[in-house]
Image (tube, rainbow, N blue to C red):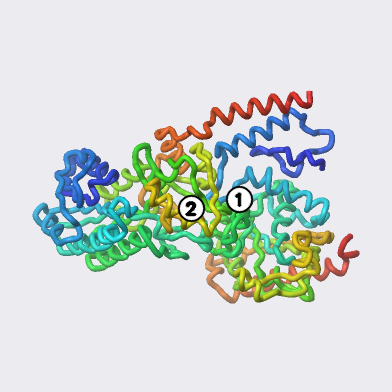
């Protein structure tokens, strides 16, 4: 039973929305939001504690408030959010270690819900079409957020071993997309011309923010121990997604991809880190059977619907709109039919 | 078949093998409409790609259509025993692999799409190298291929798909011309354990003609290592004639599907896939069948090019 819930990463979009959802639940008495910076958005009725989860202060918060459920959403996806790769890694890895160490000591804590990512599976040519939760990565991630997520999961496994009485849910989310969330993928697809890797067409999966938060909520208020992949049904190929967004694809020759990636990143246009490039090259998709059957949740949005909802909300269809294409089709049809007549 | 077939864009329930039947040519404006509709789908991304990356619309109307002239007019493929491919449900087609670049996989795929009454898609399994090569790997996925690994093979078979595998792999395609039609080692029999664990029949497939398209006289090992590929073929025309050297010789092809080997009866306890001895036995049986059929077909062949 979740009575007092602590949410980390509450100052960012998903954490803030999670805090709002949990404070709206009458069964939950108190929600404590923790982050290193003050929240910019609305965190509902949650109490905000400005605490760096990298130092032991977090243990005091857990003990004095008698927290029973910890929702860990404090893993940061891009260096820009943390002000560089070094602080990002510290927040992600050292922060998680501190948080989990505090959880281990706090007798009141009975449940841990961790927001992880399907990036832990890596991406490469030797990957199976769909990863199940039990599969080992064929091309383990070597850098960035994906590697941090792998390390976070390994510390979570360690805690679960030392505190077998804890209910631990690890949720591996596909890339989040939603009408307002500014995720790395959202930034990427908002570029007017989208750099891709020439000669490859990645398979991508998305999870709608509403579905993702609902899975987090259920894992918090219900008991779902284990690891679960969370993604909308189906896949989109990258080229198909770009066309659906009405954008223009600019294939980049493989040796030049890291250079272009640096430009895009330095210009602050979008995240185009090495692991992101690997994902956009080889793609990745996961099997969600366990989510559907064992967890008992079917995402409301398929991958395609999640993407379309994002495109519609952002009004991205400006470069190549469906009206423009249909118009061109009509004109071409008239001209070509006229030829034979 | 007229060239108009390339303009035909099959819908979900169209029969790709029956397009452009003489006397039933669609009118010019219908064709224009179909092409423009296809182009609109492509431009707006309004099509479906399955989790393996298979793009049936692109495969049927572009990729297979592009291979059809090669199939019909260049190799003049003759198909025998197509009735051995089941009309519905999962089955594993196992073939001999030859001809330097593995065109045989594409030809068998097209043979089943065009000649089988149900016009089934053959989902092929390829090596990791295929998917690391730009363009080739991408096109293979769009044409329904996926990585040759147990999870993917079993998933496809469980979904009731027709799966094609060439267990010789690069050993088959990269063998010298003097070894033609001699089957190489059949890997570790992973394909057999996949078929056993799902309980689907194995259909042996023997292809004659594929060995002569690029007679591999030598292997430039240094170049192969430089490019990171298993072998670098030297044929009578390649690399000497440059781009002309990649034109395959127009051998006459015969694709023969043999009697299916039923695996459901082999697994009474349901754990036949865990019995390595049984897996080796079935692997050998499949290999022997294909080899035997190849020799029989070769004896009857009138000539390489006719």
> What secondary structure is marked by label 2?
helix
Query: What residue is at 28 percent from the left and 53 percent from the top?
Result: A82
Q: Position of residue A254 (x, y in %)?
A: 54, 57
Q: Residues within 10 Å of mark 1 (few under 14, many from 20)?
A: many
Query: What residue is at 47 percent from the left and 57 percent from the top?
Result: A258
Residue contact between numbered discs 1 and 2, judged by CB atoms under 8 Å:
no
Q: Where B282 falls versus B146 (above or below)?
A: below
- The reply to whether residue A128 is visible in this rendering is yes
- The reply to whether residue A298 is visible in this rendering is no
Q: Name the residue that disc number 1 marks.
A: B142
Q: How crowded is mark 2: few (under 14 residues within 10 Å), some or many (20 or more)?
A: many
Question: Label 1 lies in what chain?
Answer: B
Q: Name the residue that disc number 2 marks.
A: A280
Along the horizontal axis of the image, is A95 left or right of B87?
A: left
Q: Where A232 falls versus B84 (above or below)?
A: above
Residue at the outermost left position: A64
Query: What residue is at 22 percent from the left and 50 percent from the top?
Result: A7
Along the horizontal axis of the image, is B306 left or right of B257?
A: right
Q: Position of residue B286 (x, y in %)?
A: 69, 69
Q: Write down the quadrant of residue A310 in the picture.
A: top left
Q: Position of residue B248 (x, y in %)?
A: 79, 60
Question: Label 2 lies in what chain?
Answer: A
């Amino acid at each position: 039973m979740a009575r007092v819930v602590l949410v980390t990463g509450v100052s960012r979009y998903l954490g803030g929305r999670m805090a709002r959802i949990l404070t709206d639940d009458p069964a939950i008495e108190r929600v404590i939001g923790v982050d290193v910076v003050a929240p910019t958005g609305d965190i509902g009725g949650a109490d905000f504690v400005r605490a760096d989860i990298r130092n032991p202060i977090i243990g005091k918060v857990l003990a004095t408030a008698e927290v029973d459920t910890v929702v860990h959403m404090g893993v940061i996806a891009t260096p820009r959010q943390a002000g560089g790769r070094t602080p990002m890694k510290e927040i992600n890895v050292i922060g998680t270690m501190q948080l989990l160490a505090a959880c281990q000591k706090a007798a009141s804590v009975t449940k841990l819900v961790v927001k992880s990512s399907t990036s832990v599976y890596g991406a490469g040519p030797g990957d199976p079409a769909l990863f199940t939760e039990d599969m080992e990565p064929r091309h383990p991630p070597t850098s960035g957020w994906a590697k941090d997520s792998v390390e976070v999961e390994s510390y979570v496994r360690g805690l679960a071993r030392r505190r077998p009485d804890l209910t631990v849910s690890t949720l591996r989310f596909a890339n989040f997309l939603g009408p307002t969330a500014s995720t790395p993928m959202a930034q990427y697809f908002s570029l007017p011309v989208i750099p891709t890797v020439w000669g490859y067409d990645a398979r991508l999966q998305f999870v709608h923010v509403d579905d993702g938060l609902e899975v987090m909520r259920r894992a918090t208020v219900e008991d779902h121990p284990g690891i679960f992949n969370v993604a909308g049904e189906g896949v989109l190929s990258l080229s198909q997604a770009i066309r659906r967004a009405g954008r223009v694809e600019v294939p980049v020759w493989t040796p030049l991809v890291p250079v272009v990636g640096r430009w895009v990143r330095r210009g602050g246009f979008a995240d185009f880190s090495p692991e992101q490039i690997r994902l956009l090259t080889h793609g990745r998709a996961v099997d969600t059977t366990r989510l559907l059957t064992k967890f008992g949740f079917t995402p409301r949005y398929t991958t395609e619907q999640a993407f379309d909802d994002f495109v519609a909300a952002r009004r991205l269809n400006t470069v190549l709109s469906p009206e423009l294409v249909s118009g061109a089709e009509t004109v071409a049809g008239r001209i070509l039919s006229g030829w034979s007549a | 078949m007229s060239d108009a077939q390339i303009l035909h864009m099959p819908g979900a329930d169209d029969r790709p093998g029956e397009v452009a039947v003489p006397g039933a040519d669609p009118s010019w404006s219908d064709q224009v409409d179909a092409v423009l509709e296809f182009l609109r789908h492509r431009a707006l991304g309004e099509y479906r790609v399955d989790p393996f990356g298979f793009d049936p619309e692109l495969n049927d109307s572009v990729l297979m259509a592009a291979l059809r002239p090669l199939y019909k007019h260049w190799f003049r493929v003759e198909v025998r025993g197509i009735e051995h491919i089941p009309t519905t449900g999962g089955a594993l087609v196992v073939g001999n692999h030859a001809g330097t670049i593995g065109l045989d996989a594409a030809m068998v795929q097209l043979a089943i799409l065009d000649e089988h009454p149900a016009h089934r898609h053959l989902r092929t399994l390829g090596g990791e190298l295929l998917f690391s090569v730009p363009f080739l790997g991408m096109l293979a996925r769009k044409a329904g291929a996926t990585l040759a690994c147990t999870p993917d093979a079993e998933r496809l078979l469980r979904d009731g798909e027709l799966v094609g595998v060439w267990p010789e792999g690069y050993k088959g395609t990269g063998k010298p011309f003097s070894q033609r039609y001699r089957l190489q080692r059949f890997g570790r029999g992973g394909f057999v354990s996949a078929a056993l664990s799902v309980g689907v029949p194995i259909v042996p497939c023997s292809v004659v003609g594929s060995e002569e398209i690029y007679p591999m006289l030598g292997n430039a090992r240094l170049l192969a290592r430089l490019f990171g590929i298993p072998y670098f073929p030297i044929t009578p025309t390649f690399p000497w004639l440059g781009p002309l050297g990649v034109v395959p010789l127009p051998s006459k092809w015969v694709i023969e599907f043999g009697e299916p080997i039923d695996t459901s009866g082999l697994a009474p306890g349901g754990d036949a896939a865990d019995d390595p001895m049984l897996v080796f036995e079935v692997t050998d049986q499949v290999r022997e069948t294909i080899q035997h059929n190849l020799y029989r077909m070769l004896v009857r062949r009138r000539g390489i090019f006719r």
